[in-house]
């Protein structure tokens, strides 16, 4: 894990399914210690069977996870959380239904040990286009979508296949930098958001509940000392159809560097000292879109890096 705490923002208008997604991530934490920050506990009813204890504005969740409310001061809540020195692997920030996750992400840049590695915005398949056209809420909905790295088109089981296609096409035109992923009941593989750099994912496939959102992972062993930033930007290219990339490579001087990609967002940072096995990338994409050869070719186009399937 990185010395910087990875943070994912989860946004979307009221009723889009943020609560359902957060509860699913807590259930699928699989040993990861998650910290969930919410604006108000009343806006995020954590499933009762997950709660082990409550003390003030802090909920202790099964599996070592925690949830706390931040009220009007998110940065202060994060700094307090970090100062408490509780072990955390990943920070999830569930924004209110009318908040702008892009603005929140900019504010988080003020905290040096927080790595904002993605913004996931949920959109209600039945209502997102009507809400975007509404004179009162339209600007907020469009701003939320524009900030997204991944848009989860939720509740697709409630509309026809033709409506799914039309809404997906509209989202791709409206939020050109985001990848659109259809889902039912916000049912996503936790690995899409919470992938760890040390996970062995060869041959693992993750289904989100219906064929249109089936995801697959591909692992690569990476050789060579090169430019990690150029590599990360190459893997964020829309033509590769990757939703998520994490891993460790060496830079030109031989130093270990962590590479992160979510949607079109790419970043690098020094790898944690505990990492001893560099040269591995884990890529996640929609099963029928991900092309291992194309990804390997993109890596090889940034010499002296080379890649082979792990």
Image (tube, rainbow, N blue to C red):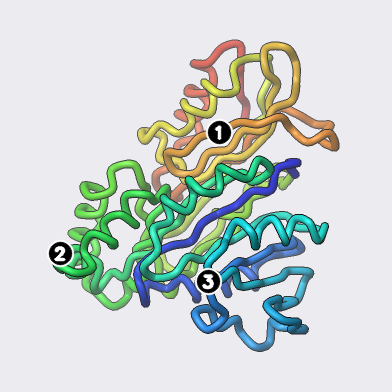
Q: How crowded is mark 1: few (under 14 residues within 10 Å), some or many (20 or more)?
A: many
Say whether residue 130 is left or right of residue 67.
Answer: left
Dot placed on the residue nearer the N-terminal end, 2 or 1: 2
Residue at left offset 71%, top offset 76%: 58
Say whether residue 183 is left or right of residue 69.
Answer: left
Q: Which of marks 2 and 3 is in front?
A: 3
**Quadrant placement of the N terminus:** top right
Q: Nearer the viewer, mark 3 or mark 1?
A: 3
Indicate whether 206 appears above or below 112.
below
Residue labelled with disc 3: 39
Dot placed on the residue nearer the N-terminal end, 3 or 1: 3
112 or 285: nearer the viewer: 112
Q: How far apart are marks 2 and 3 (CA)?
A: 26 Å
Residue at left offset 67%, top offset 18%: 251
Residue found at the far bottom of this picture? 48
35 or 209: nearer the viewer: 35
Q: Residues within 10 Å of mark 2 (few under 14, many from 20)?
A: few
Tell me if I can see residue 212 in this picture.
no
Asked if the residue under mark 1 is in contact with the one under mark 2, i.e. CB atoms within 8 Å, the reply is no
Asked if the residue under mark 3 is in contact with the one under mark 2, i.e. CB atoms within 8 Å, the reply is no
Q: How far apart are marks 2 and 1 (CA)?
A: 34 Å
Say whether residue 34 is left or right of residue 266.
Answer: right
Dot placed on the residue nearer the N-terminal end, 2 or 3: 3
Residue at left offset 71%, top offset 78%: 59
Q: Distance between the residues labelled 3 and 1?
A: 27 Å
**Quadrant placement of the C terminus:** top right
Residue at left offset 56%, top offset 63%: 73
Q: Residue 267 carries which label?
A: 1
Tell me if I can see residue 87 in this picture.
yes
Instruction: Residue 151 in the image: state x and y as whole percent.
Output: 38, 56
Residue labelled with disc 2: 133
């Amino acid at each position: 894990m990185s010395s910087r705490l990875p943070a994912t923002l989860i946004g979307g208008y009221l009723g889009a399914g943020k609560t359902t997604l957060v509860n699913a991530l807590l259930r699928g934490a699989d040993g990861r210690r998650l910290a969930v920050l919410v604006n108000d506990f009343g806006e995020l009813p954590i499933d009762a069977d997950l709660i082990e204890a409550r003390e003030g504005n802090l909920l202790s969740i099964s599996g070592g996870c925690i949830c706390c409310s931040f009220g009007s001061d998110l940065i202060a809540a994060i700094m307090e959380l970090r100062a408490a020195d509780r072990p955390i692997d990943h920070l999830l920030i569930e924004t209110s239904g009318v908040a702008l996750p892009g603005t929140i992400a900019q504010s988080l840049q003020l905290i040096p040990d927080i790595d904002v590695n993605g913004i996931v915005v949920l959109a209600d398949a039945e209502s997102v286009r009507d809400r975007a056209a509404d004179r009162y809420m339209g600007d907020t909905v469009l701003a939320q979508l524009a900030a997204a790295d991944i848009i989860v088109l939720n509740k697709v089981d409630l509309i026809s296949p033709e409506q799914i296609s039309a809404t997906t096409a509209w989202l791709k035109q409206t939020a050109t930098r985001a990848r659109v992923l259809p889902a039912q009941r916000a049912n996503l593989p936790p690995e899409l958001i919470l992938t760890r750099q040390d996970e062995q994912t060869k041959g693992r496939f993750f289904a989100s509940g219906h064929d249109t959102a089936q995801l697959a992972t591909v692992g690569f062993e990476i050789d060579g000392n090169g430019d990690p930033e150029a590599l990360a930007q190459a893997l964020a290219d829309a033509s590769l159809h990757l939703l998520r990339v994490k891993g460790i490579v060496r830079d030109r001087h031989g130093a270990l560097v962590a590479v992160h990609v979510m949607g079109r967002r790419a970043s690098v940072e020094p790898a944690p000292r505990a990492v001893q096995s560099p040269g591995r990338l884990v890529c996640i994409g929609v099963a029928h879109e991900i092309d291992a050869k194309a990804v390997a070719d993109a890596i090889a186009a940034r010499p002296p890096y080379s890649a082979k399937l792990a």
